[in-house]
Amino acid sequence: MTAKMRATVFHGVNDIRVEEVERPNAGVGEAVIRVTLTTICGTDLHIVRGEYPVKPDLIIGHEPVGVIEELGPGVAGYQVGDRVLVGAITPCGQCRACLSGHRSQCGHGDGYEAIGGWRFGNTIDGAQAEYLRVPYAQANLAKIPKELSDEQVVLLADIASTGFSGAESAGIKIGDSVVVFAQGPIGLCATAGAKLMGATLIIGVDGDSNRLAMSRRMGADVTLDFREVYVAAEVKRLTEGGADVAIEALGTESTFEGALRSLRPGGTLSSLGVYSGKLQIPYDAFAAGLGDHRIVTTLCPGGKERMRRLMEVVRSGRVDLTPLLTHTFPLDRIEEGYRIFGERREGVLKVAIKP
Ligand SMILES: NC(=O)c1ccc[n+]([C@@H]2O[C@H](COP(=O)([O-])OP(=O)(O)OC[C@H]3O[C@@H](n4cnc5c(N)ncnc54)[C@H](O)[C@@H]3O)[C@@H](O)[C@H]2O)c1
Ligand SMILES: [Zn+2]
Ligand SMILES: [Zn+2]
């Protein structure tokens, strides 16, 4: 008889259930971890609502912290019982994309679809379960320093890696002015990332007073409520001509355009949002193409070295992400967590799930 475990299974649109499924085993180059903490991502909401298709019967979730339960052949330097953090994106470290430095696009050139590095809860079983099989374990198991708790590191797997990368991809320089459009979990981490990179004027934009308050806590010097002010004009006034960097962390045409209009000539728009439909840019928002603007996009960086660095950021006290974990549920009550997170009730920012 094969061993069983509890897991959050996607059956179809608006139909996820925690149920008993087969426990995974570790094949060559793989590991199985016992998940001790995970969380729900906005992308999981897109999946549940049918806005991002995944195959039925898939276990969802992509933000795992756990303990190594089983190591497959060919994985060296780890022991059963080691505490590990695994990024949402699991690069193989060996394909053309990985070896070209585009680890999040792992698999490109080998017949995989775009964003091939995102596997958990997308193309293979994910983390909202008692156990998780980790592919390419050698490249993806990051040992957790013993002084760090699961709660301190769980958000590094996805939202912090993504949010910080928005600031890194923009190439923020010491003394830069930065505006961040949207202060959801991703935008809040972009705000923290801008501060880490050395920005000296950080402007957080949202329409939710709780989130604007958290924005200041995460490093914003000024916050703007987009319902009350015309943000681009206000940014131009505050920065005397436009921000050096605008980070888009929502994924709508209006915030993309607002970000572009907030930039000074030569400024960089760093886009993190996931868009749908058409994205149109009025010519005057970017000087008809002659403003020396840079537009960059980034998919969440993963892999064990990325996770190690992010854990050092936390260990050194440069950033504390635990205030973003506003709710905790056991795995069996994850649907309640999905409801609160999805309806953005009770001041929720991130929901921790304990299998
Ligand atoms: N690039 C990546 O790798 C990656 C990874 C994960 C998520 N994402 C994407 O990042 C985006 C943000 O994710 P999230 O979980 O933080 O989102 P969220 O839905 O939790 O938060 C969005 C925030 O935007 C605010 N908002 C709404 N309209 C606004 C406006 N006009 N101006 C400013 N703020 C506004 C809301 O009040 C809310 O606080 C999504 O598109 C998500 O799919 C990207
Ligand atoms: Zn995610
Ligand atoms: Zn690869």
Image (cartoon, rainbow, N blue to C red):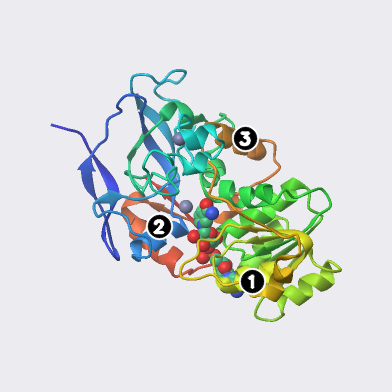
Check contact, mark 2 vs mark 3: CB within 8 A: no
* Dot 3 crowding, Cα within 10 Å, few <14, some 14–19, many 20+: some
Amino acid type, mark 1: Glu
Which residue lies at the image location 44% right of the left edge and 58% below the top edge? 43
Count of numbered badges drawn on the protein: 3
Point out the residue furthest to the right here: 240
Q: Is residue 172 visible?
A: yes
> Mark 1 — residue?
257
> Mark 3 — residue?
309
Q: In x, y percent, where is residue 87? A: 49, 40
Which residue lies at the image location 36% right of the left edge and 42% below the top edge? 111
Circle 2 — which element? helix
> Mark 2 — residue?
44
Q: In x, y percent, where is residue 141? A: 47, 30
Q: Earlier in the sequence, mark 2 or mark 3?
A: 2
Q: Earlier in the sequence, mark 3 or mark 1?
A: 1
Left or right, 219 with reference to 308: right
Q: In x, y percent, where is residue 239? A: 83, 66
The quadrant holding residue 132 is top left
Amino acid type, mark 2: Asp
